[in-house]
Amino acid sequence: MPSPTDIRPPFTRESALAKVQAAEDAWNSCDPERVALAYTEDSEWRNRSEFIKGRDAIKAFLYRKWEKERNYRLMKELWAFTDNRISVRFEYEWKDATGQWYRAHGNEHWEFADNGLMRRRDASINDVPIAEQDRRYRVTG
């Protein structure tokens, strides 16, 4: 699988699909250090109602996220793309410390620097409680 910087703008359908798959794979690792490498040092995020700036802040956010969101499993789907931007639809499932499962639904808009790193991420996300038997995504491996 290519590294985040191997897939650079301008995007074609093929390279946009590869970028989305690379992001899905990285996020499913639940490794903040790995995931953060896909972002510029000064990357700006909006994640729900939280505004984050910089790779160190992204790492801190991801450590908090995966401490809370256990058994995390994500699916991303390419929605649209242009020269240096990609939009995705996603769903992920996780459970909290009490064992309650959730499915998160959302959209992300990504903007990339010429070197292939993401410099901007805007994410709108909604969580819906689900029963364990209604899960669609399973942690493998």
Image: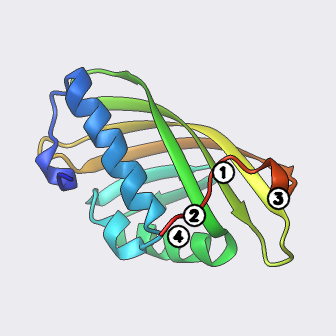
In-front residue for pair 11/13: 13
Q: Residues within 10 Å of mark 4 (few under 14, many from 20)?
A: some
In-front residue for pair 92/55: 92
Horizontal and vertical percent for residue 93? 67, 55
The label on residue 49 is: 1
Q: Quadrant of residue 120?
A: top left
The relative height of residue 108 versus residue 1 in the rendered view (above or below) is above
Q: Does the image show residue 84?
A: no
| First in residue order: circle 4 vs circle 3 | 4
Amino acid at the residue labelled 2: Val
Horizontal and vertical percent for residue 29? 43, 67
Give the spatial CA distance, label 1 vs label 3.
Answer: 27 Å
Front label number (4 vs 3): 3
User: Label 4: which residue?
Assistant: 61
Q: Quadrant of residue 69?
A: bottom right
Q: Residue at x 25, y 22 (%)?
A: 13
Amino acid at the residue labelled 1: Ser
